[in-house]
Amino acid sequence: MKVGLLANQGAGRYRLVPEAVRRYREAFPEHALYAPEGRFSPGALVGVSSIISGATNSKSYLEALSDAVSLLVQERCDRLVAFGGDGFFTNICAALIAEARPIPFMGIGTGTANVGVLSQFSPEDLTRGLPIDQTDQISPLAIYRDGQAIGYAFHDIVIGDTFLGTFDGATRNLSAEKWMTDRALLPEQPKPLSFTQDFRICRCAEQLPLKLSPIAQIIISPIYRGIGFSGKAITGLLCFSPYYPGCFCMVLADRILVEMSSAFPDYGCEIEQYLFQKGESLIMEGLSPGRFIIADGNPLCEASGSVRISRSEKRVPIIVNLLRSQRF
């Protein structure tokens, strides 16, 4: 079996990658390992069968990652194994969707949170006898702004001004605006949402009768039938949504739920919840400037204009950690 390796060298726990590669190689000695040269190489190349040239560091981050994925697909790798976090895995799977030959994906979490559906494995899971033959076909949420496709989310979409990342070795709230403008990490406290007088959220063409006020944060999450909600900021009755026939769900909260705090909050919050069925779209308009669409921890763009979210028909085969599934 030919296995393509990718790693995010900027991930929060990248220091674990050399040992994780060694553990993978010892757990599956029959696998021939391939890696692209450049910024997405796992670094620990002892035992890697081939270094594939052709990747370039001169392009943007996403262009270079897409090229690296294409090289491994063209090499006829049987699966991709990646070391990184939720956002890195989402970008790889988005590149796989763009390929004519999507191949099974295995995510080994070395990022900040490592809680998404794509982060099925930890480095400690890599032992002889680990079952890695079970795959599930999963479909993400597709995100559009003013009619233009801007990305996918496999775990959740947060509308806000900060995202979680690793800064100076610690998990921090980081400025989405600073990342979008300068690709720089700047710790910042999240602020509640603000809206124009034209703010509205629609289910397809029907405006939803929103009751919650104020709305501090909006979270939209896909539903995967039978898969637990570890790490999801979806609460209340929607904790049962893996058993509903719904397609994705939205939570409006009167306080910020997705943030890094040094103390456990000693107060509750009020939420409003909506479940969306297959074929339905969520349309959001009228957010004030300075709020961003953050998909699986990746700031994509400002949430201005008309934002539309729906469940994609496209699917990615992911390798499922059967041991983790039993823990849910």
Image (tube, rainbow, N blue to C red):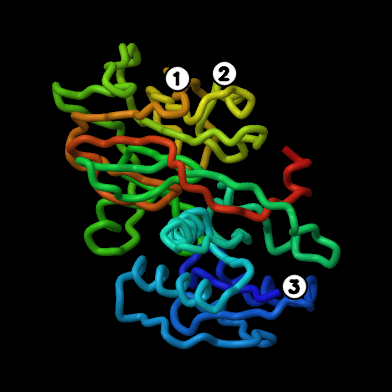
Identified by mark 3, the residue type is Arg
Identified by mark 2, the residue type is Leu
Image position of 30 (left or right of 148): right
Identified by mark 1, the residue type is Gln
Packing grade of label 1 (10 A; few <14, some 14-19, many >=20) is some
Q: Is residue 210 visible?
A: yes
The answer to whether the residue labelled 1 contacts the one labelled 2, judged by CB atoms less than 8 Å apart, is yes
Mark positioned earlier in the residue sequence (3 or 2): 3
Q: Which residue is mark 2?
A: 237
* Foreground pick, 271 / 155: 155
Residue 163: x and y in percent read: 39, 48
The answer to whether the residue labelled 3 contacts the one labelled 1, judged by CB atoms less than 8 Å apart, is no
* Foreground pick, 305 / 110: 305
Residue 6: x and y in percent read: 54, 72
SS assignment at label 2: helix
Residue 269: x and y in percent read: 46, 21
Q: Residue at x 34, y 69 (%)?
A: 63
Q: Residue at x 43, y 50 (%)?
A: 297
Q: Residue at x 50, y 81 (%)?
A: 36
Image position of 74 (left or right of 195): right
